[in-house]
Image (cartoon, coloured by chain):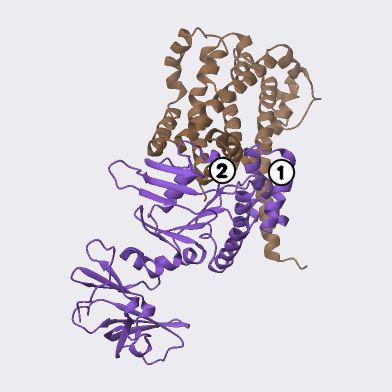
């Protein structure tokens, strides 16, 4: 096992243009499941490919297990990677696919069968060993790709959106399996995804990336509850955080914290007159879209999320007193869009 | 199970079409076989049925072909030039096509098209300057002149064919192979080439066929009987003045074409895959 670290890592594809990855410094913990989360084009895959050695950094350093590996080829980095398309070798059987890294790394022949069977057993694909990749379902292919990755017991696992080719139902069960799998083997894992649910559910910590820059690193709870800037605040959470701009400050609060005034816990709260414009009924919850009747923010759409246990009666067109607990307010500087200290809210 | 009349009809049409094509394609071979063993008298009498033996068959024509011409030598020459040209073609076009598809970005494709364009300049134009080249190299009347010249059209075609092939291989496969422990060269040799077997077989068969049927260069660069390629030797030495040795000509063509026909059939599926790659996703 090993720790992966990047120091001021930068990748510029075209000279003069903005880099795909800019000055990224981060480090995993031993045995951690670290998730790179960001929209498409945020540089998360490029970052992963640099760690794998498939892209050459423009500047900066990559360390695996405490050693700088910039000059080492992918095969010398003791990493294993699972690709978005799984990249199974089409002309080889499942057995030969899993065995491939062993052969390539010149592991003694007499150990091959035992190791392949161990990896296949771990992912319960022992019965598929004689098949060719084209004869497998999406879920089975993913498991073969994972088996191929673990078979030589790498120091680090790199996973590039491995669930994005699966249908929704399979994705949920595959996610669970992956978590279980990581618990069992305990290898440091870096996981790239654009799906915040995956990131929140699986990650020990989440690295939020945007335009090649790290916006925040933290546990799922930290990035959700204490976003470092407005990008993180709106990228995480669905629907996103409500943001109200006022003079030099932006005030944010989550839709699930913006509730009918008498339901808000605690006595320190901020109250608004809220006009409901339309309601989405989603079964377990209702999402209200409306605006605050307060002069300043009338054009701004404000969202509230009510769970199914809360009273009904908040229909389109009606006006109510809604409130947020003071402790649920988050403040951002309007210029830098970074997190700022709490201060008196000037609109009251 | 009850037979569906529509299905039977469809099956009949299917068989009929197959039958027509089989006859159409096999008939020339049949006629060549018959002609090979016919006596001259049988051949030239207009009242005789040309498709059947009207007189007893004979081996005299084969005797003429094998003992009074250097046919076996020509076959040997052709195989030798063919094998060497195939080797040169593979050695040049496989790495070139891979480099053009993978390593040079946008210019790779443009360069590939440019290389293919050279294939479109006909030998009837090129043999004049190329005969100067052959003369400078001192290769007149030698089979090596063909070994030098033939790659000029087999390599561009093969590069173009293989580029389509390599393009259809996902880049992630090579990435995976490199992460799994191979160098780029290793990934190329152990991953790309085994997956591209169809394309490489296509290149081999196609190159060999081109070499066998090439005429202009073989005719202009080489004169001595012993150094002829089969495609030139046959018409030169089995047509004497206005006398056509039809039966021996047929025998010579039959023997030369059978191995290639067989090869085509054995690898038919892979051959088609080689030509249609990239056409359908």
Mark before the other along the chain sequence, 2 or 1: 2
Viewer-proximal residue, A171 or A6?
A: A6
Give the colour chain B carries in the figure: brown
The chain carrying label 1 is A
Q: In the rendering, at what x and y percent does residue A274 appear?
A: 28, 85
The residue located at (64%, 40%) in the rendering is B268
Along the horizontal axis of the image, is A119 left or right of B130? right
User: Of discs 2 and 1, which sits in the foreground?
Assistant: 2
Q: Which residue is mark 2?
A: A78
Q: In the rendering, at what x and y percent does residue A125 appear?
A: 69, 57
Residue B269 visible somewhere in the drawing: no
Residue B212 visible somewhere in the drawing: yes
The chain carrying label 2 is A
The residue located at (74%, 21%) in the rendering is B41
Q: Give above or below for B91 relative to A140.
A: above
Q: Give above or below for A96 relative to A333.
A: above
The chain shown in purple is which? A
- Badge 1 marks a residue whose secondary structure is helix
Q: Which residue is mark 1?
A: A112
- Badge 2 marks a residue whose secondary structure is loop
């Amino acid at each position: 096992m090993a720790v992966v670290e990047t120091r001021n890592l930068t990748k510029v594809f075209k000279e003069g243009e903005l880099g795909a990855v800019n000055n990224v410094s981060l480090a995993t913990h031993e045995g951690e499941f670290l998730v790179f989360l960001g929209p498409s084009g945020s540089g998360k895959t490029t970052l992963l490919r640099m760690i794998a050695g498939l892209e050459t950094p423009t500047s900066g350093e990559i360390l695996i297990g405490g050693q700088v590996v910039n000059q080492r080829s992918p095969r010398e980095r003791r990493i294993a990677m699972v690709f978005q398309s799984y990249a199974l070798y089409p002309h080889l059987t499942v057995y030969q696919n899993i065995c491939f890294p062993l052969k390539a790394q010149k592991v003694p022949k007499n150990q091959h069968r035992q190791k392949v069977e161990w990896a296949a057993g771990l992912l319960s694909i022992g019965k598929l060993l004689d098949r060719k990749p084209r004869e497998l379902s999406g879920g089975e292919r993913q498991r073969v790709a994972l088996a191929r990755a673990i078979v030589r017991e790498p120091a680090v696992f790199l996973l590039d959106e491995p669930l994005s080719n699966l249908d929704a139902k399979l994705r949920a069960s595959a996610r669970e399996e992956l978590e279980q799998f990581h618990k069992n083997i305990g290898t440091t894992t870096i996981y790239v995804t654009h799906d915040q649910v995956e990131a929140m559910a699986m990650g020990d910590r989440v690295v939020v990336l945007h335009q090649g820059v790290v916006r925040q690193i933290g546990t799922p709870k930290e990035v959700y509850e204490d976003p470092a800037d407005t990008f993180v605040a709106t990228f995480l959470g669905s629907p996103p955080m409500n943001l109200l701009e006022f003079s030099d400050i932006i005030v944010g609060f989550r839709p699930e914290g913006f509730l009918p005034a008498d339901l808000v816990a605690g006595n320190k709260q901020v109250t608004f007159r809220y006009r409901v414009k339309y309601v989405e009924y989603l079964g377990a919850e209702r999402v209200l879209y409306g605006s605050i009747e307060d002069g300043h923010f009338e054009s701004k759409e404000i969202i509230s999320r009510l769970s199914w246990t809360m009273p009904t009666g908040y229909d389109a067109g009606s006006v109510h007193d809604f409130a947020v607990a003071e402790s649920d307010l988050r403040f951002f500087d309007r210029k830098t869009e970074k997190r700022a200290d709490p201060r008196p809210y000037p609109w009251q | 199970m009850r037979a569906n009349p529509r299905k039977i009809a469809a099956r009949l049409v299917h068989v009929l079409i197959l039958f027509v094509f089989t006859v159409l394609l096999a008939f020339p071979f049949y006629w060549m076989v018959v002609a090979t063993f016919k006596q001259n008298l049988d051949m030239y009498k207009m009242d005789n049925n040309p498709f059947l033996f009207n007189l007893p068959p004979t081996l005299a024509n084969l005797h003429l072909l094998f003992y009074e011409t250097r046919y076996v030598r020509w076959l040997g020459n052709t195989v030798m030039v063919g094998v060497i040209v195939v080797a040169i073609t593979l050695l040049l076009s496989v790495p070139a096509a891979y480099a053009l598809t993978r390593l040079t970005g946008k210019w790779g494709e443009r360069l590939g098209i440019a290389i293919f364009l050279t294939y479109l300049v006909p030998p009837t134009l090129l043999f004049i300057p190329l005969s100067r080249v052959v003369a400078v190299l001192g290769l007149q009347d030698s089979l090596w002149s063909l070994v030098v010249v033939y790659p000029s059209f087999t390599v561009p075609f093969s590069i173009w064919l293989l580029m389509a092939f390599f393009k259809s291989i996902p880049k992630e496969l090579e990435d995976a192979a490199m992460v799994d422990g191979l160098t780029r060269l290793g990934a190329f040799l152990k991953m790309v080439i085994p997956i591209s077997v169809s394309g490489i077989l296509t290149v081999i068969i196609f190159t060999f066929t081109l070499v066998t049927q090439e005429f202009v260069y073989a005719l202009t660069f080489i004169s001595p009987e012993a150094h002829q390629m089969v495609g030139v030797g046959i018409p030169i030495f089995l047509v004497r003045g206005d006398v056509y040795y039809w039966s021996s000509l047929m025998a010579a063509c039959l023997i030369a074409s059978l191995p290639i026909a067989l090869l085509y059939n054995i690898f038919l599926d892979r051959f088609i895959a080689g030509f249609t790659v990239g056409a359908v996703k």
